[in-house]
Structures are given as structure tokens and as C-alpha cells.
Image (cartoon, helix red, strand yellow):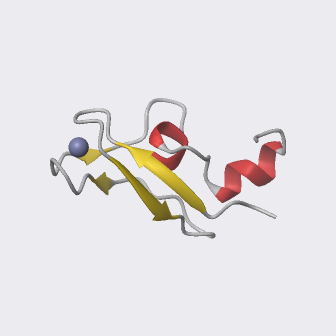
Amino acid sequence: MSALESVLTCPECGFSKRETMPVDACQFFYECTACQVVLRPRRGDCCVFCSYGSVKCPSMQQQCGCET
Ligand SMILES: [Zn+2]
């Protein structure tokens, strides 16, 4: 069972927002609702949730199984 909600924290302004993750796709871009900066995944990460979210994306959760 994967967690489908992640709290994204903007690295620019520190704003946090709970977002529902797509189950079958990786989200590459995310626009911060507070400062409108467009976030992209960091090197080595597959999506913005892996880089900036409180929970990694569903596909990473399934690959690893060790995430809390
Ligand atoms: Zn922001």
C-alpha cells in the first residue's frame, strides 16, 4: 500500500502544501502556489515528490519498500 499524499515544501520560499500524487506517472514540474517558482526534480530523483515531498512517489515506494 503506497502513500498517495505528500507534503511538498518549496525550497525557495519554504511554503508547504499537501498534494495528491499521481499513481502511474512521475510529476516532473510543480509550480509553487505561494511564489510561483517552478520546481524540477533534483539530480537522481524521478519526480518533484522525491526531491521536495515528505513522501517519495508511489513508483519509488514500490521499488524500494524501505521508505517510511
Ligand atoms: Zn515557493
Q: Is residue 66 above or below residue 26?
A: above
Q: Residue 37, position in %: x, y? A: 19, 45
Residue lying furthest top in this view? 43
Pick the front one: 39 or 34: 34
Say whether residue 47 is visible.
no
Q: Tell whether 37 sits left or right of 65.
A: left
Pick the front one: 54 or 23: 54
The residue sitting at 56% across, 66% down in the picture is 25
Residue lying furthest left in this view? 35
Q: Where does the N terminus fall, quadrant-wise?
A: bottom right
Q: Tell whether 41 sits left or right of 57.
A: left
The residue sitting at 15% across, 47% down in the picture is 35
- Ligand 1 image-quadrant field: top left
Pick the front one: 14 or 48: 14
Say whether residue 6 is visible.
yes
Pick the front one: 11 or 29: 11
Q: Tell whether 21 sits left or right of 65.
A: left
Q: Residue 33, position in %: x, y? A: 23, 57
Q: Where does the C terminus fall, quadrant-wise?
A: top right
Q: Residue 16, position in %: x, y? A: 36, 47
Q: Tell whether 63 sits left or right of 16.
A: right
The residue sitting at 46% across, 29% down in the picture is 43
Q: Residue 38, position in %: x, y? A: 24, 48
